[in-house]
């Protein structure tokens, strides 16, 4: 990340409407319109067009649908990358797919690897396989989805052949119910500490169609595990500026990635 500048990141903590894609696109557009020219990365929650619902597979879009087109339009208007997950149909399967969309219309995707069997997500959705590292404005970003947060091997950072870290920002989008809010807050901090990386976690608020409450707790965490900014149980947009020089300095002072165990993801 030697050529990286400060990264301005905005986390959009909204009260997602249940099974209402058109309404959600309109709602979230209103929340992010003021960010035009002020952000590098705008992050929406998991399944932001529907809420976390197994029944939403019936209305899953494809990559030529309204939501991808909408995200392209928002990214171009804001001059920022826009990301979040939606139900996406492909080759007869439905994935909980993270979309990372850039102002030039480029779209990179990550399909949620760890399906939430506790809520029977695996009965309707297919699991992804590959981890994604996005290069954006000099930063390497690893986008993951909700339940992935509980599985540290899949998110483990490391060094490439040029001694550069695999990623500099670990990004989670979620629908994480308030009954498990303590693990959410704790695991975000743990992932930052162990991976010598910034971490951003975006959750929703409000009540969904299954009667679950969400308290938000969206946060940006620095590489020491300290919250830079947090928002609890309210709709809103929070922002932080990530400094690459501070991250590089920490990795130089404390080069723990040099001592990490070797591994491969299969």
Image (cartoon, rainbow, N blue to C red):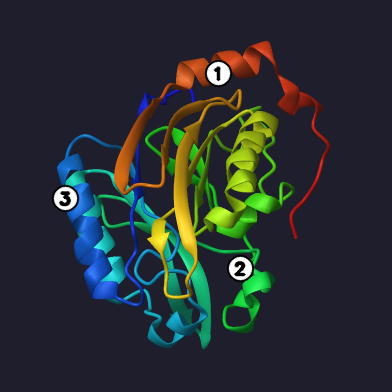
Residue beneath the point at 63% across and 28% down: 196
- Asked whether the viewer can see residue 8, the reply is no
Residue 89 position, x and y percent, is: 45, 80
Compared with 203, 158 (above or below) is: above
- Mark 3 to mark 1 CA distance (whole Å): 32 Å
Return the residue at label 1. 248
Q: Secondary structure at mark 2?
A: loop
- Mark 2 to mark 1 CA distance (whole Å): 31 Å
**Residue contact at pointers 2 and 1, CB within 8 angstroms:** no
Mark 2 surroundings within 10 Å by alpha-carbon count, few (fewer than 14), some (14 through 19), many (20 or more): some
Compared with 187, 205 (above or below) is: below
Residue beneath the point at 64% across and 14% down: 252
Return the residue at label 2. 128
- Find residue 179 and report its image quarter: bottom right
Q: Secondary structure at mark 3?
A: helix
Residue beneath the point at 18% across and 37% down: 37
Answer with mark 2 or mark 3, whichever residue precedes in sequence.
Answer: 3
Answer with mark 2 or mark 1, whichever residue precedes in sequence.
Answer: 2
Q: Give left or right: position of 126 versus 63.
A: right
Return the residue at label 3. 77
Residue closer to the observer: 86 or 89: 86
- Asked whether the viewer can see residue 168, the reply is yes
């Amino acid at each position: 990340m030697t050529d990286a500048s400060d990264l301005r990141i905005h986390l959009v903590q909204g009260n997602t409407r249940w099974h209402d894609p058109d309404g959600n696109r309109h709602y979230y557009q209103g929340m992010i319109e003021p960010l035009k020219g002020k952000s590098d990365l705008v992050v929406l929650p998991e399944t932001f067009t529907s809420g976390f619902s197994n029944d939403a597979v019936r209305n899953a879009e494809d990559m030529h649908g309204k939501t991808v087109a909408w995200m392209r339009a928002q990214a171009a208007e804001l001059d920022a990358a826009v990301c979040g997950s939606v139900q996406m149909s492909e080759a007869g399967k439905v994935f909980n797919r993270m979309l990372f969309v850039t102002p030039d219309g480029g779209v990179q995707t990550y399909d949620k690897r760890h399906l939430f069997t506790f809520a029977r997500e695996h009965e309707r959705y297919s699991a992804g396989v590959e981890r994604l590292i996005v290069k954006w404005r000099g930063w390497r970003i690893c986008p993951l989805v909700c339940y992935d947060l509980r599985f540290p091997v899949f998110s483990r950072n490391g060094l490439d052949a040029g001694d550069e870290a695999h990623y500099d920002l670990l990004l989670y989008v979620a629908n994480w119910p308030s009954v498990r809010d303590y693990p959410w807050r704790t695991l975000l901090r743990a992932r930052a500490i162990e991976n010598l990386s910034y971490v951003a976690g975006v959750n929703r608020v409000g009540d969904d169609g299954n009667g679950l409450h969400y308290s938000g707790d969206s946060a940006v965490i620095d590489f020491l595990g300290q919250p830079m900014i947090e928002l609890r149980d309210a709709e809103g947009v929070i922002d932080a500026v990530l400094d690459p020089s501070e991250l590089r300095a920490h990795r130089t002072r404390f080069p723990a990635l040099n001592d990490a165990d070797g591994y491969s993801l299969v």
